[in-house]
Amino acid sequence: METVENGKVVQVHYTGTLENGEVFDSSKGREPLEVTVGQGQVIDGFEQALLGMSINEKKEVTLPPEEAYGPRDEEAKRKFERKEIPPGLDLEVGQTVALSTPQGQQMPAKVVQTDDETITLDLNHPLAGQSLTFELEVVAIS
């Protein structure tokens, strides 16, 4: 029986929940997620959980923050001058915005403080510091 190993392309259905049971992401009602195992396309713990699974196998795994989006870093807050913010962009505390990295990737940031001169953003991933539970089902391996 074929199993998931590094270098294989895997299609997987998943549901991710927080410790309180709230679903934060799921492939239900969509195409399965396609991942080339070993390429770092998904969080480490998710990828590690897939290793050794076979087609139609189901598994539930709970990942500590270190295997998911990492611990929260209270130093990961940055102040930006209002003049650095595009005109017409009215940011409010609690709002999540997308920033572009120098490599062109999008990264979420949460507005945590504003005043007339500056805006402070929390650059932690929204799921940083949280244990995540995934229900996994491998539907194809190639």
Image (cartoon, helix red, strand yellow):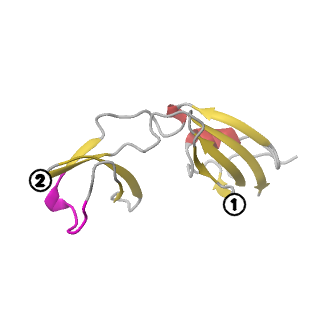
| Secondary structure at numbered mark 2 | loop
Sequence-wise first label, 2 or 1? 1
The image position of residue 30, as x and y in percent, is: 67, 62
Q: Which mark is residue 133?
A: none
The image position of residue 135, as x and y in percent, is: 69, 42
Q: Residue at 27%, 42% (x, y): give it.
A: 77
In this rendered view, identify the residue nearer to me: 88 or 46. Answer: 88
Span shown in magenta:
80-90
> Which residue in the protein does label 2 denote?
116
Q: Is residue 76 magenta?
A: no
> Which residue in the protein does label 1 denote?
29
At label 1, the amino acid type is Gly
Count of numbered circles in the view: 2
How far, Cα to Cα, is label 2 from label 1?
Answer: 44 Å
Circle 1 packing at 10 Å, graded few (<14), some (14-19), many (20+), is few
Circle 2 packing at 10 Å, graded few (<14), some (14-19), many (20+), is few
User: Is residue 51 shown left or right of residue 118?
Assistant: right
In this rendered view, identify the residue nearer to me: 19 or 35. Answer: 19
Whether residue 140 is visible: yes
User: Is residue 50 shown left or right of residue 81?
Assistant: right
At label 2, the amino acid type is Asp
